[in-house]
Image (cartoon, grey):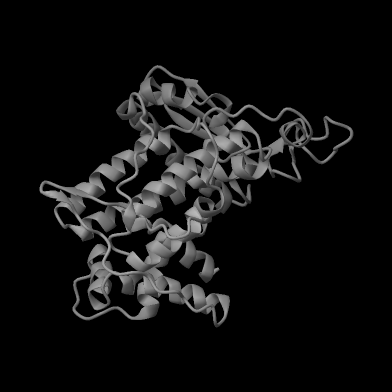
Amino acid sequence: MRLVLGVIFGLAAQTAAAQAPGGEIPIGIEAPTALSPSGTAENLGMRLVIRAVNDAGGIHGRKLVERSYGRTQSGAAGDAEVMTHVARLADDDHVLLLWNHGGTVSTQIAPFAMTHKLQVAVLQDYGRYDFHFAMQKLHGFCAEFLSAFYLDILKDRLYTTAPASPARRSAQSALFHITHSLLRLFAPVLSFTADEAWEHFTHAAGDSVFLHDAYALPPVEGAAELVARWDRVREVRSQVQKELEALRVQGAIGSALQAEVEVRAAGERYSALASLGDDLRFVLITSAAQAKRVDGAEQERISVHPSAHAKCSRCWHYRADIGADSGHPDLCGRCVANLYGAGEPRSHA
């Protein structure tokens, strides 16, 4: 697992040339050296993560990490402590970025808008040489948007839909573009690890992340409105998670997929939730979810209760149509469609 964390963070570390008023900021200093594969996978992964920090300039790189996390005491952090901080950026979920890139035209445009917003802010920080601010933004994006939200939701689409389906390929396409941006944005701080992961990501011999400028993300029409809408969805999702946790503490459910949710919302909150249609359950990671309109904020509430249905042995959702196909008594309707039919329609999540 440490090896996975190290490689994934290295992947995220492939990025960016920033534009300063006087021209381009050089981001490469020296060529990378190869890592020896000797030792256990866990130790190798640990060395990859530690090396990522050392690449930022040895003791100066460590101090950069410390400042990024608000540390004020003097002295360098130990390897284990630095690894713990950096590993947070490389949450297990980020393996999706490494192993699921690719695809054609993406229907998942909201992540492009959010990644573009991040890229603009980080490049401005680099242009002012405010590397610690850039790292704070990158950490927040990886931890709060990617790991805790987007990739958490995307796993169902990647794991359950057919390999060549539009649903899965559009998700892979989105991950491809996001990874291209993030890999370049991390490169000024994690030079060796960035270049090593870039080679793994592109499979292009002789290429280097330091030969590329900031990535040109696909344009998104109405990006500001789209980001605002998804911010409202994320706010509701956070509230739903609190209700689910309370139900879990009571012992009524084990995982969130054992629950069904009803969200009563007004105004723009309702519009944002309703726009997702049946995909709302995938965003909330529950087996069923619906939004109902109310007249005002005082009537808004969230209701959660355990599902009364059986569990699909493949996707783990609790659905009423499990066993509807006599040939597959343990599967829900969408899994049967994904495995043996035309596949399920997915538009938003």
Q: Quadrant of residue 337?
A: top right
In x, y percent, where is residue 67? 22, 66
Which residue appears at 26% of the width and 73% of the height?
A: 57
Look at the picture and state if 81 lies above or below 321: below
Q: Residue at x 38, y 66 (%)?
A: 86
Q: Residue at x 56, y 75 (%)?
A: 41
Query: Which residue is outermost to the front?
Result: 206
Most extreme residue toward the left is 22
In-front residue for pair 78/40: 40
Mark yes or no: residue 284 visible.
no
Count of picture labels: 0
Q: Quadrant of the N terminus?
A: bottom right
Residue 337 in sight:
yes
Query: Residue 232: percent from the left, percent from the top?
Result: 38, 32
Q: Is residue 246 left or right of residue 342?
A: left
* Of 244 and 298, the residue lying toward us: 244
Q: Quadrant of residue 78?
A: bottom left
Please state the horizontal and vertical placement of residue 38, each as a whole percent of the image: 54, 82
311 or 300, nearer to the observer: 311
Q: Residue furthest top?
A: 295
In the displayed structure image, the side of residue 138 where residue 303 appears, left or right: right
Q: Check the image and report above or below for 198 versus 179.
A: below
Image coordinates of residue 148 in percent, x first then y, are 45, 49
Horizontal side of 126 relative to 315 (left or right) equals left
